Image: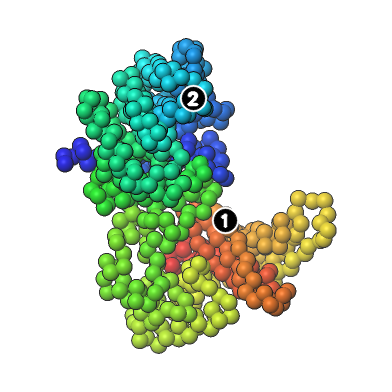
Amino acid sequence: MDKMDKTITVFDSTLRDGAQGEGINFSVSDKIAIVRCLDELGIEYIEAGNPSSNPKDLEFFEKVKNLKLVNSKLVAFGSTRRRNSDVKSDSAINALISADTPTVCIFGKSWDMQVTEVLHTTHEENINMITDTIKYLKENKKEVFFDAEHFFDGYKNNSRYALLTLNAAIKAGASAVILCDTNGACLPDEVYDIVSDVKSYLEKNCLNAVLGIHCHNDTGCAVANTLMAVKAGAQHIQGTYLGFGERCGNANLSTLIADLQLKKGYLCIPPQNISKLTKAAKFIAETANIHLEHNLPFVGKSAFAHKGGMHVDGICKTPLSFEHISPDTVGNTRSILLSEMSGRSAIATKLNYIDKSITRDSPKALSFSEKLKALEHTGYQFESAQASLELLMLKHLGRFKPFFSLEYFKVMSEQPAIKTERSCSVVVKVRVGDSIEMTAAEGDGPVHALDIAVRKALEVFYPSLKDVRLSDYKVRVLDPGAATAAYVRVLIESTDTEHHWTTVGVSTDIIDASWKALIDSIEYKLSLDLNMI
């Protein structure tokens, strides 16, 4: 296989198909930020939206014209012309041209049932719609891709007609035809067989176009289906960067790029950019205002996390024993998870990151193990709160420098709430060295007010805290049988946009538990600033 055959065109649809996912809502500035991110990563095509679908996309296409991209081409997305109409007078088609992108992706029906039952037109008119639209776009100097919508269902129902739609698209000037598993119903063996058939058909009929694949994840097979399509001859893959999209989502490009480039030797993005995969994943998740799933392959927080004693022992001896690649290859990091069940090797390995003299038989390792067991017996859990764990280790090893101390805080809440935007107020008094700072704040509840007040007081001394915000807050009751006297565990996730960390607090008082987690969050940020962690 020559070098050309080992190159895969990556087409990212995060801003179009991804934006159709439940709970996803990009602003114009969000879309521009993601375009910059994908361009930096080296994605070849970025499908940015449908310029005729809504005012936001219209505004985006106007603003993005001034954006200078290094690696990527922007793509406008739309449908074939309306049935029984003149393509030149079709406002949606002309909007695609006005979007001024070098490439346009057109979708058209390839399932005969969809033609008659959804478009309510004839099979012949559907072919004309595909042909007219692509020819007109080519006349306007556009590179055109054809998304053969519902291709796999169409092929299984009427293979001759499905292939005719591809034939029409290529003869009209489409440089790539993409087979879409629009309903996400196919399994990998079906995809392989059908893509193989299509590739043979194109070659036999001298139809010169790149063959592509677009998979949805309704059977949980979108990534596997895409890999099988590539094995069968597809050289163009479509998906969304984190897999979110309509219904169950799309093929996850962060997984596919790594699989194809690191496992199969294909070139998807510039080799030097593979180490940016995790950074891009975090940025896109943050911009989309979603949590990056911890168990995502390659880029998730747990992708290289180890807890079992035998696993940690193996990792310490040779990382290949329980890691299929080195985490830094994709810009991720290894994580050793500690709990009351952790062995001495795991604890020593974790402490060794801070103090290189620590071994599995060191007294400090043994005493830390006992401390960990005692805390977890009271309800603490550090697997999901690595920031609190790292602070605990720093303190245990005598490496922690206190940044401030609490003099007191007072929480005041009125119920029923008076007519105000804020339901709670807090007064906080802190000491930093010989200085005292006292401040008050209002918030939507005591935790929100506490967060605002304590950071307001400490920002006088530590301005970097202005960049910190809480991104998640979770409470779990640990012993429901104790009713309102139960212990509660509070997990707080924080971010300064560059870093993300989680802290924990436990108490019978939910305010006290929240305060403990909140203070750990602030101390962790300040420790990061001083490279203590």
- Mark 1 or mark 2, which is nearer the start of the sequence? 2
Quarter of the image with the N terminus in it:
top left
- Image spot of residue 487 (x, y percent): 65, 76
Residue at x 48%, y 54% (from the top left corner): 292
Rendered image quadrant of residue 250: top left
In-image side of 414 versus 3 (left or right): right
Type of residue at label 2?
Thr
Considering the numbered disc 2 on the image, is that residue within a helix, a strand or a loop? helix
- Side of 358 where 507 appears, left or right: right
Q: Nearer the viewer, residue 83 or 15?
A: 83
Using the image, determine if residue 489 lies above or below residue 64.
Answer: below
Indicate which label's residue lies in the foreground, 2 or 1.
Answer: 2
User: Which percent across, then down, holds residue 364?
Assistant: 42, 84
Q: Between residues 260 and 435, which one lies in front from this camera angle?
A: 260
Is the residue 227 above or below the residue 365 in the image?
above
Residue 116 shows which numbered tag? Answer: 2
Is 215 on the left or on the right of 409, as rendered? left
Q: Residue at x 29, y 33 (%)?
A: 198
Q: CA distance from mark 2 to mark 1?
A: 48 Å
Q: Circle 1 is placed at which residue position?
A: 471
Residue at image point 56% right, 31% down: 56
Three-letter residue code for mark 1: Ser
